[in-house]
Amino acid sequence: MATDYQKITLDGLWTNNPALVQLLGLCPLLAVTGTVVNALGLGIASILVLIGSNLTISMFRHFVPDSVRLPVFVMVIASFVTCIELLMQAFTYELYTILGIFIPLIVTNCAIMGRADAFACKNPVGASLLDGIMMGLGFTLVLVLLGAMREILGLGTLFTDMNLLFGPAAESWKITLVDDYSGFLFAILPPGAFVGMGLIVAAKNIIDQRLEERRKQQPKTPSEGPKRARITGNIS
Amino acid sequence: MALIRITSPHTHRPGNTGDVMRTVILATLPGMAAMTFFFGWGTLIQILWGCLLAVSFEAAIIKLRKRPVSFYLQDYSAIVTAVLLGLAIPPFAPWWVMFVGILFAIAIAKHMYGGMGSNPFNPAMAAYALLLVSFPVQMTSWSAPFVMVGEGWSIISFIDSLQFIFSGIQPALYDAFSMATPLDVMKHKGGFTTEEMWYQSPLLAEGIGAWHAVSAAYVMGGIFLLYRKIFTWHAPVAMLGTLAAVSTLFFLIDPDNYPDPFFHLTTGATMLAAFFIITDPVTSCTSNKGKLWFAAGIGLLIFIIRSWGNYPDAVAFAVLLMNLSAPFIDQYTQPRTYGHAKAKRGMKGNS
């Protein structure tokens, strides 16, 4: 089976983005995107789990009977999540406490389970690895975008507390966009996440629509030329 | 608003949305006047500023949606939203409170759901709930009713009010006259009984009449609308009746902890809601029976949220919750079709 790496990449990042198109994994997506650092932390954790699970499941795809594949997937994903959880506990403890229950809940993230069942168990290792990376990246990009939107609206800052993830050097990354901002609590609260998510999905649809329109207009011009280029005789 | 005219003459002028909305705006005038009289120029400035914003946002969004701008602006619905929100928020809230509120009301609560006639939630109440959740400090600091506490009417002049709202320069006297609303005080009375609460806040005991008067002004406007047949009696009566009944029950059981029904009816946004908010034909129920259930639900929810909820006033949340249930109520309260025995769908209604 020939694998189209370009298509896999594009699927993960845009056309079949787990957050924007498949609308999978919304629970952590909506719950932890109050600030960029939380979003990025969960995003990176999800990427690592997704890469690990896709790789492993793809390697063992010929040995796992179809009837018990889901429990096996869960086992694999759960082991990776446990690893990530312990790693976060060791290196980014404060972020680990902030994200709380949403780290173990990565196990039940349907985006990861979905990729395992829909892609990794049917495709070779290389393609599955790439799929894991790209799907994870696509998911993380949406998380960070939503986190940034909500942080700017809600707190008037960007990249607050990045030191939780990148060490003390990142403490100065914080950008205060509006001084003396009185805070727009709605953006930080769950309803703000839903509205923000809706706006991002709408924006993606608008971009897709525009691209589609442009694609439709383009082929008309070149197709008219060659039609009559070789005509030698008379046309009745 | 289709009304059946039984007696001759049978020709009648086909009403349009703009007429209805203009009458509603006219009916808010007594309330607007009372608010200005008791709480200073702030309310008037907020309403004018809100109208300006509402019309601009509405025009911009209609243009974006490629619809005829002047046709939709003529239905005045944006202005009604702005007036209602302006009456509901504190008179001296900073300018951006109104800005955020109107933007949310027009862009998200109204046009994202398909514009006038398709919005499931009352735009003004959606905006109010958003503001209350987002800016608790600005949304709960009210000014005292100047007249009632022994000061002249224009203690904060028009220019001072403008400066206060738009550039945040606080008039010298303002601090002495900022206070919580009666409902807020009632919510945070702590261990006091309702009786003791009045002694604890003399400013409130003196000024409570202002809220009563504003409520009375809304009732006047409401009766005018009822007389002009803009809406039927069902919704206001059901809502006020339920609220009065439930609050009387609890007041009789435990008068120390629950305020009397008169307090519930005449403070906060009860009257504004009863006559101007829940009578919105778009977001409420359609049939008369449905209106009764819808409004009774709001009355009950107002009491529940006021008594045991986190926020002092409950009108916005109660209205939004019942807006959400309106289609469901409509499903079960379909009136009998003339000539048919019972409704085909839902619970077999007989109204």
Image: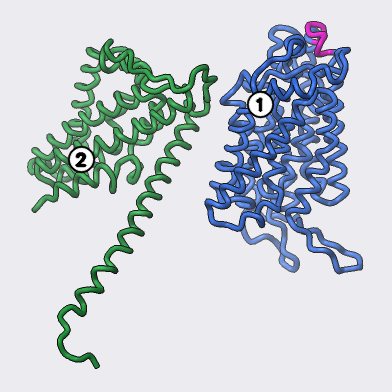
Chain colours: A green, B blue
Marks 1/2: CA distance?
46 Å
On residue B305, the disc is 1
Report which residue position mark 2 lands on.
Answer: A116
Q: Nearer the viewer, residue B287 or B348?
A: B287
Type of secondary structure dominating the magenta stretch: helix
Q: Picture quarter containing residue B47?
A: top right
> Which chain is home to disc 2?
A
Q: Are marks 1 and 2 on the same chain?
A: no
Residue located farthest toward the right when viewing the structure as drawn = B8
The part of the chain drawn in magenta is: B198-205
Near mark 2 (Cα within 10 A), the count class, few <14, some 14-19 or many ≥20, is many
Q: Nearer the viewer, residue B127 or A175?
A: A175
Residue drawn at 35 percent across, 20 percent down: A99
Instruction: Determine whether B236 is above or below B183 in the image.
Output: below
- Residue B203 colored magenta? yes
Residue drawn at 19 percent across, 74 percent down: A226
